Amino acid sequence: NEVQNLWKENTEILSQAKNYGYDVIDTFSITMGRYKEFLQGKCACHFHEVDKFEFSQSTMRNWMWLGSTASGATDRMGCLNLPLSNKQKDLCKRKPNLLPTIKEGARIGIYECQNQFKHERWNCSITNDYSVFGYALTSGTKESAFIQAVMAAGLVHSLTRACSAGNLTECSCDVSLQSGGSADEGWHWGGCSDDIQYGTVFSRKFIQSPEKGPAGEVGAEKEARETMILHNHEAGRQAVAKLMSVNCRCHGVSGSCAVKTCWKTMSSFDKIGHFLKEKYEHSVQILDRSKRKVRRKDKVQRKVPVNREDLVHIKKSPNYCVEDEKMGIHGTRGRQCNRTSPTADGCNLLCCGRGYNTHVVRHVERCDCKFVWCCYVRCRRCETMTDVHTCK
């Protein structure tokens, strides 16, 4: 009876996962193996101690999870047990040396998302499961668009950095530029130019399979979502390419700069994140029943082509003001706000008009430190009082 009841509980977990469109097939091999061990008396624990948490966590294939897990965890799991698609697992098995770089790409993508939205109603919070971003990832909103773009950009950026650093055998610096330049203008290509070609191509191969949308999506609606996802992935890659810059170093007597050596380099990832945030602000809503074509929903501008660098979405965003557990929206209650700011982090906007609470925080720290001969440092204890405002 105990086993039957627990089996029923796990069946309910699977049912909930299906409602969100998650793939649960990979879960059975792990769980059934432990279940058999329990029946055969090989497992010292009871069946209810077999992680129901792990069971529910394994319901979504999402490479982004690599960026949110602890260092070393992916190495212990191995390619086959990671929440990857079959094609991604094959790539992982063939090139296991790339796994740390892929993980780093996911990490900087998640970090930059949270950095760009830390003062917004939606602050790019992550979940404890394999979906990482929960509702925001599959909602088809502007937030989905940003996540898709910044994660693809993070992968390209991480791979290219690893290539330039000589950490990968598959790629190196951009050798096509080393023999070029302009003798008349007194400069030539040199150094190690970042070659984004390898990272871009690998990124297309690795994340070519779009994330699953909500259950029940079929036909043109499903194709429109896949088109949106693929477009935003490419927009993220294009952002890395567009923001490439040229750095030069002068050579000559007494710094005369008679000759310059120049090389191409990627922008810092926070600059790429800022660029994508601006694209997010002007994200284009497209038809949610458009078959493999990115077409604007606005009838007046429908004939205006959508740029490859633009982000696109198919659904309007919720206001993110009120907590909605079913949709994974945390709301803004309890968030710290800036009472005097007129922008997104201001109490008026962040708190959605509900008002805010104010409490005083006391800080005590060492200050006015001086070295006293001999031999110690003498400091005063300084106390400051700060008003902290949080949304009601």
Image (tube, rainbow, N blue to C red):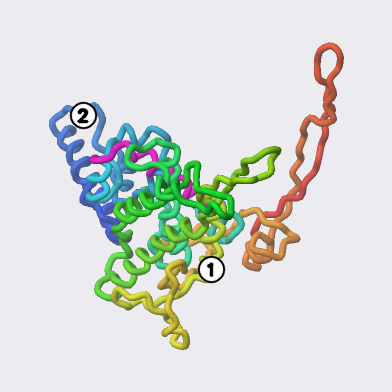
- Residue 319 marker: 1
SS for callout 1: loop
Pick out the residue farthest to the top. 374
- Residue 64 marker: none
Instruction: Work out whether residue 325 or residue 381 is closer to the camera in this orientation and state it.
Output: 381
**Amino acid on which the number 1 mark rests in the picture:** Asn
On the image, the x and y values in percent for residue 94 come to 24, 41
Q: Is 237 drawn above or below residue 105 in the view shown? A: below
Q: Is 42 drawn above or below residue 376 in the view shown? A: below
Which residue, given by chain and number where applicable, does mark 2 sit on? 43
Calculate the distance from the C-alpha at mark 2 to the C-alpha at mark 1: 48 Å
Q: Is residue 105 magenta?
A: yes
Residue 147 visible (yes or no): yes
Pick out the residue farthest to the front. 184
Q: Point out the stretch of residues depicted in magenta.
A: 93-113
Horizontally, residue 333 falls left or right of residue 65, namely right
Horizontally, residue 152 falls left or right of residue 206, namely right
Q: Is 117 drawn above or below residue 179 in the view shown? A: below
Which image quarter is the N terminus in?
top left
SS for callout 2: loop
Query: Which secondary structure type mostly characterizes the magenta part of the structure?
Result: helix
The local crowd at label 2, few if under 14, some if 14 to 19, many if 20 or more residues have their Cα within 10 Å, is some
**Image quarter for residue 213?**
bottom left
The local crowd at label 1, few if under 14, some if 14 to 19, many if 20 or more residues have their Cα within 10 Å, is few
**Image point 44% across, 46% down: which residue?**
178
- Nearer the camera: disc 2 or disc 1: 1
